[in-house]
Amino acid sequence: MGDPKKQRKRYSTPKQLFDFSRIDEEKNLTKKYGLKNRREIWIAAAKLKKFRDQAKKLILKPEQQNDFILRLHKLGLIEEKATIDDVLALDREKILSRRFQTVVFEKKVAKSIKEARQLIAHRKIKIGDKVCDVPGRLITIEEENQIKIK
């Protein structure tokens, strides 16, 4: 089965490494969302792929679609009255906008997106009564209202 202590790779690299249009797009996303490196974009793309694959499997099972859509609604990725088509229409910018770092900046807790990452890494931001130091964590709608400085 594998070693449980070993971390698994959570992303896949692009097939064509030197596609300059992709590189420019990723550079703009890195600046806009204050990411550490391009790997964080690839992780968001992998999460998006996972959500889309689940949605494709649930097309034929309408009784299980409501739970899946409710879960994505709690993450703030889609509206409550959304359909599977809305899930398939998601893009990686929507996932990047729900990251802890971006939410902290949008709530004006930090002055810049880079400062938001620094405050999170230095354990100065709390969600409710717990300190979280993972800037790439997806924040739910309930947690978004509980974000504050320590």
Image (cartoon, helix red, strand yellow):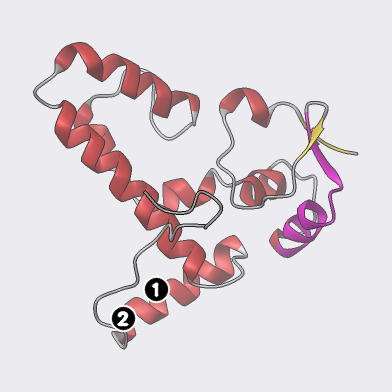
Quarter occupied by the C terminus: top right
Which segment is the magenta one? 114-127
Residue at the spot 57% in from the left edge and 47% down from the top edge = 99
Describe the element under mark 2 as helix, strand or loop. helix
Q: CA distance from mark 1 to mark 2?
A: 6 Å
Crowding near the residue tagged with mark 1, few <14, some 14–19, many ≥20 C-alpha atoms within 10 Å: few
Crowding near the residue tagged with mark 2, few <14, some 14–19, many ≥20 C-alpha atoms within 10 Å: few
Q: Position of residue 21 (x, y in %)?
A: 31, 81
Describe the element under mark 1 as helix, strand or loop. helix
The residue sitting at the right extreme is 150
Q: Is residue 98 above or below residue 12?
A: above
Q: As shown in the figure, which amino acid type bears the numbered disc 1?
A: Glu
Residue sitting nearer the eye, 40 or 12: 12
Q: Position of residue 143 (x, y in %)?
A: 66, 28
Q: Position of residue 4 (x, y in %)?
A: 51, 48
| Mark 1–mark 2 CB contact (< 8 Å) | yes
Residue at the spot 31% in from the left edge and 84% down from the top edge = 17
What residue is disc 1 on? 25
Q: Is residue 46 magenta?
A: no
What residue is disc 2 on? 21
Q: Quadrant of residue 26?
A: bottom left
Q: Quadrant of residue 82?
A: top left
**Position of 55 compared to 117: left or right?**
left
Q: Is residue 84 above or below residue 114?
A: above
**Position of 14 compared to 126: left or right?**
left
Q: Is residue 86 above or below residue 35?
A: above
Q: As shown in the figure, which amino acid type bears the numbered disc 2?
A: Ser
Q: Position of residue 97 (x, y in %)?
A: 52, 48
Residue at the spot 16% in from the left edge and 15% down from the top edge = 62
